[in-house]
Amino acid sequence: MSIKAIIYCSDNINDQATEHDERHKEFWDNLSCLRAADQERDTLFLSDKDKRIQSHEDNSIFLLAVDRGANDLYRHQIIPDLIIGDMDSINPEVHDHFRELTRIILYPEKKEATDTELALDWCSDNDFRDILIVNDLQGEFAHSLGVVMLLFKARERGIRAAIFTMRELVFLIPQIYQSNGAASCRRWSCRGRPRRRISLIPLSDSVKHISTSGLEYPLDKDELFRYATRGLSNVFVDGEIEICYEFGELLGVMESSFEEIL
């Protein structure tokens, strides 16, 4: 996917360092390199933080921290372009540090949306159309499910959005509906290394007339049901797959690294 904005979230309630495996280390190394390149291009970053959004370059990635997520960025010496939320879980020293370096948008604790939804709304209002939500989905189940459901809101607003969990990419198939004239087939294709694992999960009662190519266990005008697990744990055969179906809502969960997403 083409990333223009990253919404970084953290469900790490103990505020422990998040380099507990190689995938986390790979993510932080890649993100540090991206931020270093972006900040070198942006000469206005330290002199005028409010102009950061206006001067943002097409080939750079806008980094938005959601509340507690700023704690992780602080530990890894990465400066976000924006911090958003009710600030009920950001460390005071982190808040004081970033207050001099970047823009912070504060919301009241009593509100009708999660901080992640507010971050998505802000990106939508500021015309970002390719968004990666970084969230390991290992916090409270209700909040993790809520993050997944935000993918529908993103699609309704014409935004290509996905969730990166440090191990997998979670996304709707397709991410954006495209008109094919009289044809009703919803089509999506992807390149990736052989043996890459992918699961196809119906979110509607069923996904009808689904066909796939390039997978070890192909489908040919089949039907996947929400109450069955047939679509789980398929794998790429030769590096390219295509999925086409006529009706339903389909969630993809694909083994991914941050480097592969970029």
Image (tube, helix red, strand yellow):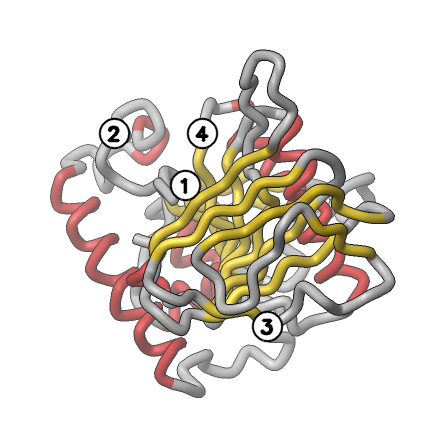
Between disc 2 and disc 3, the foreground one is 3
Query: Amino acid type of disc 4?
Result: Phe
Q: Nearer the viewer, residue 82 or 214?
A: 214
- Estimate the spatial distance between the alpha carbons at disc 2 and disc 3, rounded to whole Å: 36 Å
Q: Which residue is mark 2?
A: 58
For disc 4, the marked residue is: 128
Q: Residue 5, labelled with which disc?
A: 1
Tell me which residue sits at (61%, 81%) in the image: 14
Quick check: marks 2 and 3 in contact, CB under 8 Å? no
- Is residue 46 or residue 141 the one in the foreground? 141
Q: Earlier in the sequence, mark 1 or mark 3?
A: 1
Label 4: how many Cα within 10 Å (few below 14, some 14–19, many 20+): some
Confirm or deny contact between disc 3 and disc 4 (CB under 8 A): no
> Which callout, 3 or 4, points to the residue nearer the camera?
3
Tell me if label 1 and label 4 are in contact, CB under 8 Å. yes
Mark with earlier residue (2, 3): 2
Lower sequence index among marks 4 and 2: 2
Q: For mark 1, does the 10 Å Cα neighbourhood hold few (<14), some (14 to 19), or many (20 or more) residues?
A: many
Q: State left or right for residue 213 relative to residue 172.
A: left
Instruction: For marks 1 and 3, give the CA distance.
Output: 29 Å
Task: Say which element carries label 2.
Answer: loop
**Residue highlighted by disc 3:** 233
From the viewer's perspective, tell me whether residue 58 is left or right of residue 227: left
